[in-house]
Amino acid sequence: MRVLLLSGLGPANLNFAYLQGSLFGGQPDAHGREALRRSGHPDLDLRRLSFTRSGRSFALLRPRPAAAPHLTTVTLRSILRSCGHDFAAVDLEDVWTGRAVVPPGDFGAVLLSTTYIWNAPLLATAVDWIRSRLPGVRVITGGQFTNLKFMRALNDHTEIFAVVRGDGETALPKTLDALAAGGDLSTVPNLVWRDGPHLRINPVEYVDIDGHPSPGFTGEAPVIPYESMRGCPFDCKFCSFPAASPKWRYKSAEKIRDDWAGYAEVNGAKSIDAMDSTFTIPPTRLRRLLEILPGSGAPPWDAFSRANTINSPQLVEGLREARCAQLHIGFESMNDGTLKRMSKRVSVKQNRRAIELLGDGGMSYHGLFMVGYPGETPEMFQDTMDYLTGDYRGYFSVARFSITDETMPLWQDKEELRIVAQDATDPASPWSHIGMDSDEAARLQKETLDRVRRGNDHAVLDLWQYDYAPRLLPDHDHATNLAVEKCVERLGMAPVDHPDPDAAAEAVRVQLRRLGALGVGLSPVGQELCHDAI
């Protein structure tokens, strides 16, 4: 049976227009143009920043070589290939933007991933797209949203014939086999389905992810997204993920090593993006990984970590030797009261220790912080702002808290913290609680970004870099690259940071001089620069 796969990211991210008025992207406004004229560089374009390598002039801001494919889409494609069902695919991002076109041919079913669908209106948009273009074709959904709300999805949309809850490696092929042959669906694990006028809920079974083959890739795949576990042993109150995948399971260190080395050999993988919320647990697996990854042929890798697992210089050195390129760590807050409210199960002391160890060890890391979690007051958040401004080193981001789901565990504290949300399923919707409201959180977010960017020479905002190759100077160490990015950040934001055009012009000159001392210059207008991957 031929099926149509709809999978991909959500319709938008929640980054606000913080870079507006800067030199990052687009043409500078009148103030920016005047500042550049007074700086003596009226034609300054950040894309002309360059360095010399082996006698060639390379653009500093080279395009990112390749983005990691969407993990859910990769997994579903691999399942469909392995079970022999023909399929075509449409990226959900094209559905949100109106660019999606149904591939030619007939389809017996549509498979709709709801992993990045976070509310009922989004689900309705996707189902309406299917109904209007493929009327009468049965829809089978799976993923985070319908894992949690399968009954509502089935009641709201008669087009949805079945929902696969949890693991799909066994359930999806059996469902398609049964539908193709007109067989019995009652024995398919993890399936909720329509049996005439009735809804049947089949028992849930879990796949042994350590024994089951990991997703395969066809052809060259420079960046591999990787899942090493399902579920989560923690209960952070801002996350509803464990509710959708309640059984925590993880692959062994040996399987991870073999998978990664295999992707390098078969698919030419140059890097691995470990997408798990916490790749560095359990500690026994991490220690084993650090023993067996060096010399295994596995490529460099990025991962998410908890702060309390970064607990010694020896562990940081082990990460470096195992080719860990960067860690993303949800520090969230530098106030113990806020961390306790979140049920984060780490302390400010552990956060500080992790940052110091990674910084001292020369490891690249991205610290994620949050403002406005329920119960947090502006005075409590001041601890985070002060730490970022005065002591933090490395890449950072500060997100405004948002309520994305009415199943988030934080609703357990609704009465105590007086949590109110205009729409509990819309991340952009206004909210309030005993500590502050969403407008106050947005103000504090911008104030923090401004203060840290302008006042901390060692903290680099991780926002504008997404389109560019990581490690701008590939032959230099992490500290040098961080210094270069800080100069580029201040250069690009000079028109925003300095309302007076003379002050902005002087900031431009200062940052160009600092970049020059780091081996980065401004190439002449018209000079062709090399943009090859290094």
Image (cartoon, grey):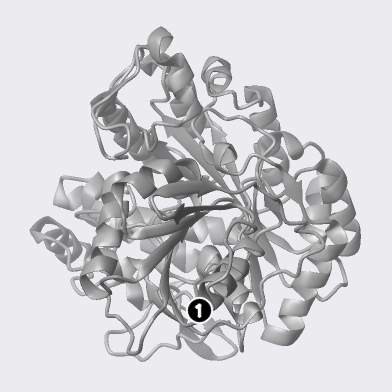
Q: How many numbered marks does the figure carry?
A: 1
Residue 120 occupies quadrant: top left
Q: Nearer the viewer, residue 280 or 455?
A: 280
Q: Position of residue 206 (x, y in %)?
A: 71, 51
In the image, residue 73 above or below residue 352? below
Left or right: 531 in relation to 39: right
Residue 157 horizontal/vertical position (percent) = 30, 52
Query: Which residue reaches farthest top?
Result: 416
Image vertical order of residue 18 relative to residue 106, above or below: above
Residue 485 can be seen in this image = yes
Mark 1 element type:
loop
Closer to us: 450 or 369 = 369
The x, y position of residue 495, in whole percent, is 22, 53
Residue at 53% x, 18% y: name it.
341
Mark yes or no: residue 510 visible.
Answer: no
Looking at the image, the residue that sits furthest to the front is 196
For badge 1, the amino acid type reads Pro
The residue tagged 1 is 65
Neighbour tally class for label 1: few under 14, some 14-19, many 20 plus, Cα within 10 Å: some
Picture layout, residue 109 above or below residue 243? below
Question: Residue at the location (83% across, 71% down)?
Answer: 258
Q: Position of residue 412 (x, y in %)?
A: 48, 18
- For the point 79% across and 75% down, which residue is it? 261
**Residue at image x 58%, y 18%?**
340
> In the image, is residue 307 above or below residue 416?
below
User: Which is more toward the observer, 51 or 448?
Assistant: 448
Q: For residue 443, which quarter of the picture?
A: top left
Q: Quadrant of the C terminus?
A: bottom right
Left-right relation of 316 to 497? right
